[in-house]
Image (spheres, coloured by chain):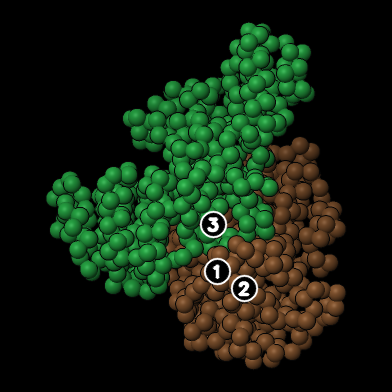
Chain colours: A green, B brown
Amino acid sequence: MAKIAVLGHGVVGSGVCEVIEENKESITRRAGQPIEVKRILDLRDFDDLPYRDKFTKNIDDILNDDEISIVVEVMGGVSPAFEFTSRALQKGKSVVTSNKELVASKGAQLLALAKENNCNYFFEASVGGGIPIIRPMHLCLAANEIDEIVGILNGTTNFILTKMIRENMEFDTALKLAQDLGYAERNPAADVEGHDACRKICILASLAFGRHVYPQYVQTEGISNITLEDVAYAENWGGVIKLVGEAKRLPGKDTIKCLVSPALIHKESQLANIDDVFNGVLVRGNATGDVVFYGKGAGKLPTASAVVADVIHEAKSFGTSTSLTWADSSENFVEPVEALCEAFYVRLFGASRAQIEEAFGAVQFLSRAGAEADESAFVIKPQPVQKTLDALKTLEDAGVRVCTKIRVADC
Amino acid sequence: MAKIAVLGHGVVGSGVCEVIEENKESITRRAGQPIEVKRILDLRDFDDLPYRDKFTKNIDDILNDDEISIVVEVMGGVSPAFEFTSRALQKGKSVVTSNKELVASKGAQLLALAKENNCNYFFEASVGGGIPIIRPMHLCLAANEIDEIVGILNGTTNFILTKMIRENMEFDTALKLAQDLGYAERNPAADVEGHDACRKICILASLAFGRHVYPQYVQTEGISNITLEDVAYAENWGGVIKLVGEAKRLPGKDTIKCLVSPALIHKESQLANIDDVFNGVLVRGNATGDVVFYGKGAGKLPTASAVVADVIHEAKSFGTSTSLTWADSSENFVEPVEALCEAFYVRLFGASRAQIEEAFGAVQFLSRAGAEADESAFVIKPQPVQKTLDALKTLEDAGVRVCTKIRVADC
């Protein structure tokens, strides 16, 4: 019998309790022993629940209970989750989490602490909700060098973009709908501005490349400036606009590419059809080629089931998993975006074709129904981002109004 | 240092040697120790290879070598692979395989033998080539009851169907092209008649439902009867024809649905866009919802990397994995197809609309350019297969020529 504690009885925490109860039989078979939720930490009262006796408001009731060998941290946020996780690991209790903010900001430190104390810090649920991605990347792609990861990592923004693309809905209307449906928070910044996707690509990049990639070094751009005009031009180009997180090994360099931004994705790409609240992650290995994982990136039961899978894994494991981990990186090893080589879609007003081609060389001009007279949209060939920025600056100095620039993804 | 032997130096076997050499550094880091290929069994001579000294033609050189702890069986076929695998397991050596024929026909027996001898029988590479599917299904979906699996499991037939759909190529021409490109064997029956897909769905179903599903009980239908007319009607219906393997828990029953057949898949399905030689597997869990795994289902390096991932896992593991396994099932527990409830697309000649509606109730009629005068194509609502077969028989008895019937998949 493995006894666990759950920190936080919100959406995911209550889902964990539910999945453990619901799938008791198969969990016992797969874990080799029954798994029981012994205590639940939450500051709120849940007097109506049949398992109300398990609740406590005092973390020490859990940390000092030697019967509890696994702690599930599903509180979210850095504080007090960081303190509680650290103390649990110091006591030799393994911790399973869905807290992407904490893993992205303190992962290396907590993984090292787990190793020191011969226990584990598992975080499958922190990326991709119910989609198995952390462990497949770690285990099954073990024989590959991972060269690149491209992911649609945030369901809320993907829902909004899908509505814009399929139903010609304005950004604000789509956001409002997402809020009404419970897909977006009242304050949607973390999703819409790309911070959530940024945390997730940092976790995947850290795991793939073995060194902690900190969110503050990753240039992050959201989708609030995307318009229906851009969506129309993307379609004319032969693709769709998605919010993607990308991490890539740079050949011959000690740095990596890592960024979050909207991007044009070609219709032929396996990521182009990942719509609504679904997530998809493309992992490019040197032996497997492209592998894509697809599924619901959020939601109570999918996320809870990923947490419980980690709990089962811990219940079966012996000592520390020494390889599902990465080292701290005191220095930033993310290449500045300006130095990357990227293709861009650009939309602007008041420039002649000749001016545009003088600035960017040969470009692919795009069209849309109802374009304004002085409007141009085009895709430029991959070149150093700084060169593109300089060219845009020169055009702006000449009175051109640059409206949008969106990366073209290579996936 | 973990020392391994490779049985068979064909496409996959040589790929295993290559991947282990190529990714030495990351493999050592991930396995926690270096991995060395000590011996290779093959009846052929490979005098030009730098590692020619490792070859032997005698299996006893491997089985009697106590330094060799892991045996990679990539010979294919049941004999002598079954004998060699059994003897290796009896010696306590773990075996890693890509041999789907052996796993599908003798899996339960070999898994039990591994358990008895406190070692492992791993088979990630037997399904989906380089796509991690066995282990993610086992580990990460551990907290789910798996209700259903639908997979495009054979790259050769998927390539042929893609050519038919996208380029309007006849079946025979597409098959010839697949053979010229090396995607199909000279004798393409195993692929084209669905036997390869059948072995794979049997392995996935055994793992998901915990009891061995034997290929001989699984009704298997290939794609050699699919015509461009059917492809056109499928498009009119709003989908594509794919060869799918399906396994499904039947609510309230002790049997499962398990079959391989061509099927109409709606364009909105995540499986509809899995084209060319790619494979895709949709796993439907009671908590995660739909999760899809996508990638190259075959090929030297993808398959080899899946084998090596299992080798790494074995090098790190302690004793038997007691749950990546299933029980033998002395009896067939696959529901007869006739008793299933399925929707069908039907194409026939010489029946009036009234006759068709009398036979099947309300149906959805389809159209195509250039249809013959007495040709009809339509989709019937889900109903017991026996009822559909009876209705078709009645029509045939009345002089109607039934040309094609293809299942409509629910995915």
Q: CA distance from mark 1 to mark 3?
A: 14 Å
Q: Is residue B112 visible?
A: no
In this rendering, the label closer to the viewer, 1 or 3? 1
- Where residue B96 appears, x then y in whole percent? 61, 75
| Amino acid at dot 2 | Ile
Q: CA distance from mark 3 to mark 2?
A: 20 Å
Q: Is residue A217 visible?
A: yes
Q: Quadrant of residue B199?
A: bottom right
Query: Left of A361 or right of it: where is B124?
Result: left
Q: What residue lies at 82% left-to-right and 73% top-to-bottom?
A: B49
To the question of a shared chain for discs 3 and 2, the answer is: no
Tell me the SS state at disc 1.
helix
Label 1 near label 2: C-beta < 8 Å? yes
Classify the position of the N terminus of chain A by image quarter. bottom left
- Where residue B339 appears, x then y in whole percent? 52, 64
| Amino acid at dot 1 | Ala
Q: What residue lies at 54% left-to-right and 33% top-to-bottom?
A: A261
To the question of a shared chain for discs 2 and 1, the answer is: yes
In this rendering, the answer to whether B372 lies above or below A355 is below
Q: Which mark is residue A137?
A: 3
In this rendering, the answer to whether A72 lies above or below B82 is above
Q: Which mark is residue B31?
A: 1
To the question of a shared chain for discs 1 and 3, the answer is: no
| Amino acid at dot 3 | Met
